[in-house]
Image (cartoon, rainbow, N blue to C red):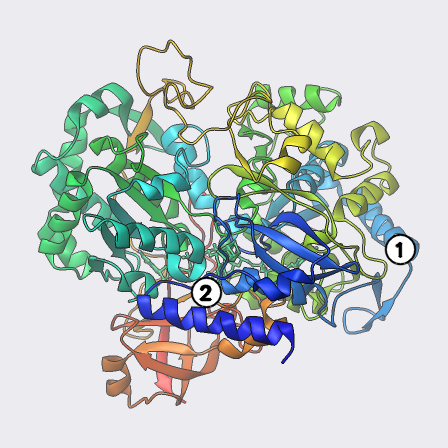
Amino acid sequence: MNQSRRDFLKLSAAATAFAALGTPFAWSASPQGQQQVEKWVKGVCRYCGTGCGVLVGVTGGKAIMVKGDPNNHNEGLLCLKGALLAPVIYAPDRVTQPMIRKGGKKGQLAPASWDEAMNLVVSKFKESIAKNGPESVGYYGSGQNLTEESYLANKIFKAGLKCNNVDGNPRLCMASAVGGYTGSFGKDEPMGSYSDMDAATCFFIVGSNTSECHPVLFKRIASRKQKDKQVKIIVADPRVTNTARIADMHLPLKPGTDLALLNGMAHVLLKEELDDNRFHSRYALFKAMEDGKPVDKSFEDYRKFLEDYSPEKVGQITGLDPKQIIEAARLFANSPSTMSLWCMGLNQRKWGVFANQLVHNLHLITGKIGKPGSTSFSLTGQPNACGGVRDTGTLSHLLPAGRLIANPEHRAQVEKFWGVPEGTINPNPGYHTVAMFEAMGQGKLKCMLILCTNPAQSMPNAKKYTAALAREDAFVVCIEAFGDAETLRYADVVLPPAFWCEREGVYGCSERRYSLVGKAVDPPGQAKPSVNILVDFATRMGVDPKLVPYKDSADVWDEWRRMSAGTPYNFAGITRERLRKESGILWPCPTEDHPGTKMRYVRGEDPLVPADHPDRMFFYGTPEKKAYVWMRPHRPAAEEPDADFPFVLTTGRVIDHWHTATMTGKVPELRNAFPDAYVELNEADAKKLGIANGDTVRLESRRGSMDLPAKVGEVCRPGLVFVPFFDKKKLINDLTNDAVDDISKEPEFKICAVKVRKA
Ligand SMILES: Nc1nc2c(c(=O)[nH]1)N[C@H]1C(S)=C(S)[C@@H](COP(=O)(O)OP(=O)(O)OC[C@H]3O[C@@H](n4cnc5c(=O)[nH]c(N)nc54)[C@H](O)[C@@H]3O)O[C@H]1N2
Ligand SMILES: Nc1nc2c(c(=O)[nH]1)N[C@H]1C(S)=C(S)[C@@H](COP(=O)(O)OP(=O)(O)OC[C@H]3O[C@@H](n4cnc5c(=O)[nH]c(N)nc54)[C@H](O)[C@@H]3O)O[C@H]1N2
Ligand code: SF4
Ligand SMILES: [Mo]
């Protein structure tokens, strides 16, 4: 039996053991396997926003195994996906040379030289800009790019090409969390850290399947609960997920009713005087929107606003027992420390920003914030959506370090730092993701550079947007590592990037922790680091060479690090040398001798709060230096079920696949665990519809229909069906809704109305 097989069997045994405990598995390479390793290179897992530290074992120039970094926050643990990363690097369908499509969109991709491919790309971009202006081109990026790649693409487009059409998949993912933090605290990013999980006595998990999507963090939560019996877990999710299985209280609310639930909990807190008056009167302001403008409100106004959300009424809206709502509020407030965790169940919603802010409200009115174990913590999906996209401002309305395109002072600051003439940056925000693809469909956006994302499979209402990519006048460039990505069907040019540990750069995970992904091995064939591809693109586009004076990602990092100095994102102290030595550092970190920050906005913890500040906490992100409690009413989903389409379809993830499965689909152990998509439905619904496990079920939404095998059980609440989106043979996004949140422009992937019947 070969080594990897033996390791795998050990690992499945561990998986079974942990499954029995109700916790996910974690794993480290076997001692025998490790003996073959010549050197270990420190890095970060390629997949989720947990951002586990890894060590890549290299022998003869090849990565042969991956184990957890004992010095990073994960303390050596990895889930199966992370542990099985090495074979992904050597997948036979890696893109290893540039390709150009010949004979129009229906033609074939043919190998080309770098020069041919880049000349074609640049001639098309230049032609489009000359004829239709810089608004006719765009960059569509990813929370999986290195920080240096995102920062650079943002700079090249916004300053070099004067084009603000810079967006990316974090718009499908974290935009509502950004809107939530920015709206409530003035600046983006969580104030707490993973270490809060070791101190919390109550976890309020809402719209997050932590067990499958952030497995190593789930393990940390589960261990905390195993060690300390007073720890309580509340899970609000319309499905009985693996996460819900360890909960003391599961709230199986109707999809899309969280706003009512959260306001209902706040109602109980005030009614039972479980709020912390000393805290909110000192640190919070009450706000509401009136006629499109934010206005100041009083605590009394807030109390009146909440009168509408009695447990009985909220019970009717959510389908929950009113007693559960009262009990959840009491647990939240009476527990010595409470940590909320959420993810796409709140973000991917028509009212995602509202939902985020209503969670922040619960912490602000109870004072459960800024103390160990008390924090309002958004789980980030991708490994570098925080560090790479949110912090660098690589979205159509942002500039680096929390600045806004619409703000003239912010533009001037960035122009000065980048050394470009005043007025270079266009004052109008560019297209957000859905608008960008829409513009392409209307022939307004002619050229798109896509870096490290697979929109043909991941966009909502996907047929509408693949039709845009398929237009003969739409010029689509994909920098893409794997040949089976669905979007390559529409690419006019494909460029081969160095993948994961084939180049060096920084990832920033959910807890503001920046860690370095070290270069362990060389890229295959003609593939090269995307930083070099972007510099080449900019140079050929005729961008001022002073804008892109970089030989590698370390140079880009150094510039960005210096740019952060003096901003609320200050990480000037996180040098490359430190990143090479240390396993991750949390910003703010203003100086090279600063250890990093676990609790933002807290005196004595956050270096940006003056040491002699009179208050313990200081919310320096907002103009009034206080946090905001927002009055946000409950609103329905964009498409509620009705007589014609009586079920709710929700979509999401499974533990063993990463998104569109171009990576995890290459690992037999992961692929075999989930070979194909399916539709999960409640057994009572199945019985009514005469559907048995394994039967073919037809789902139909207003946008499309699809046949899928049934998985009947108790996971979904009645009236709800769930389909994972990893399977490119079953593009479930042909059915999903592309209605977006009013504020964040994030699409409502989580809710659309469907018909369900036996096919
Ligand atoms: N294994 C794995 N892990 C991943 C990823 C992956 O592809 N695979 N992707 C990463 C990324 S980018 C992301 S964004 C995260 C996503 O992580 P999660 O958000 O945890 O995962 P999802 O499966 O998208 O959805 C989470 C839950 O939301 C619930 N939900 C649906 N509608 C509602 C609602 O109205 N209210 C509430 N309260 N809950 C609702 C669903 O039932 C589901 O259990 O995962 C990250 N981690
Ligand atoms: N129905 C439904 N749809 C969803 C969601 C949902 O919950 N439901 N969630 C949304 C969310 S939260 C997200 S984050 C998106 C994710 O959606 P995508 O970003 O489209 O999905 P990925 O599979 O992560 O795509 C990454 C692409 O980059 C390629 N790649 C991998 N490594 C590299 C590299 O080093 N360099 C380059 N250049 N390419 C590389 C991969 O092969 C793959 O094609 O999906 C969204 N879509
Ligand atoms: S939990 Fe996330 S970051 Fe950690 S090993 Fe698993 S996929 Fe990688
Ligand atoms: Mo995501």
Image height of 385 relative to 748, above or below? above
Label 2's element? loop
Sequence-first tag of 1 and 2: 1
Which residue is found at the position 28% from the left and 42% from the top? Answer: 200
Q: Amino acid at mark 2?
A: Arg
Which residue is found at the position 47% from the left and 78% from the top? Answer: 705
Q: Quadrant where the N terminus lies?
A: bottom right
- Percent x, y of residue 293: 36, 29
> In the rendered image, which residue does mark 1 sit on?
114
The residue nearer to you, when weighing 382 against 592, is 592
> Seen in the image, is 359 located left or right of residue 300?
right
- Percent x, y of residue 214: 44, 55
Which residue is found at the position 26% from the left and 56% from the top? Answer: 236
Q: Quadrant of residue 516?
A: top right
Q: Quadrant of residue 316?
A: bottom left
The residue nearer to you, when weighing 729 against 491, is 729
Classed neighbour count for the residue bearing mark 2: other residues with Cα under 10 Å, few (<14), some (14–19), many (≥20) = some
> Seen in the image, is 183 located left or right of residue 538?
left
Q: Amino acid at mark 1?
A: Trp
* Observer able to see residue 127: yes
Number of numbered labels in the structure image: 2
The residue nearer to you, when weighing 271 against 291, is 271
Q: Which mark is residue 653?
A: 2
